[in-house]
Amino acid sequence: MFNILKRNKPAENPSEKISFFSRLKQGLSKTRQYFSKNITDLFLGKKVLDQEVLDQLETYLISADVGIETTQYLIQKLTDQLARKELSDCEAALKSLQNEMQALLTPVEKPLTLDDTKKPFVILMIGVNGAGKTTTIGKIAKTLQAEGKNIMLAAGDTFRAAAIEQLQVWGERNNIAVVAQQSGADTAAVIYDAIESAKAKKMDVLIADTAGRLHTQTNLIEELKKIERVIKKSDTSAPHETLLVIDASIGQNALLQAKQFNAAIKISGIVITKLDGTAKGGIIFAIAKQLQIPIRYIGIGEGIDDLKPFKSEEFVTALFSMEE
């Protein structure tokens, strides 16, 4: 028997004391050291763009977890432009680098959009332990609720009693319905029941949590496939969105996680959390280039307003901003 907390009164977003762009710059402070300081100083400190500058640039980009493949791509772009004499000086090269980096991100700048013909619109959340998945669910739910949507949550991480309790706390705090069973229950069954309940109550959106699982654990990846099959028994078009939550602070391993999860279950969007406090924010460029999966949100803190739709120009501008 599952438990439902029936609360769905929309809540207003608190007013922001400072802009998200200002918080983004602050949150990216460690990664910005490689861009606004190291890379900018490298270019502006030289009058001539030569191989020495490009070699040092390569080191900085790799150190910021842009990744070898993506770094080589960017270096080759500058090298080709230099050979064609399209770059007059280092300042022009810096501007070109920023443009090329934004060009990598622009194709994946695709915010989450709901298909109002799908009710409930089912969002399946996946990712490893510690990535911030359950917290991200609460933040997305709060955002959609503020847009006037009726939201229901499914506590599908039945391996951890704390995860169920955490989601229920989010539900109580934000007046959002939660469907849950006891710890150890079958995840697929919990989510199936939640979809049926959401249908009966004419909910707009169902967000389903799953157990945080390592991408290297074959049996748990197989369980994700089972969850997807069971969901389709209730709605053949569901899940309508499968969001992978990844932790930016683990650098290149985040890319590996995304690749292996995507091989197991088709990911339609990515949420990159914990960009604040890490110098590895460059991983976003590697993910964008190699996977080309839409980046729906980025997270730069614990607050409800610290998860926002990803915007490529804003992100690159923040990285190269010299102002604190």
Image (spheres, rainbow, N blue to C red):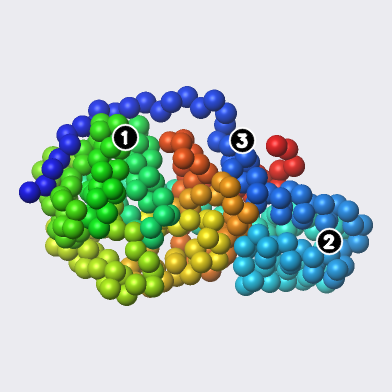
Mark 3 vs mark 1: in front: 3
Q: Is residue 200 above or below residue 270?
A: above
Q: State how far apart marks 3 and 2 are (Cα).
A: 31 Å
What residue do we see at 58% from left, 47% from top?
277
Q: Which residue is drawn at 38% across and 66% down?
A: 214
Q: Which mark identifies residue 145? A: 1
Residue 22's disc is: 3
Q: How many residues crowd mark 3 within 10 Å: few (<14), some (14–19), many (20+)? A: few
Front-most of residues 23 and 107: 23
State if disc 1 and disc 2 touch (CB < 8 Å).
no
Number of numbered discs overlaid on the protein picture? 3
- The residue that mark 2 highlights is 87
Residue 188: % across, % down = 18, 60
Q: Which of marks 3 and 2 is in front?
A: 3
**Element assignment for label 3:** helix
**First reached walking from the N terminus: tag 3 or tag 1:** 3
Q: Helix, strand or loop at disc 2?
A: loop
Q: Which of disc 1 and disc 2 is earlier in sequence?
A: 2
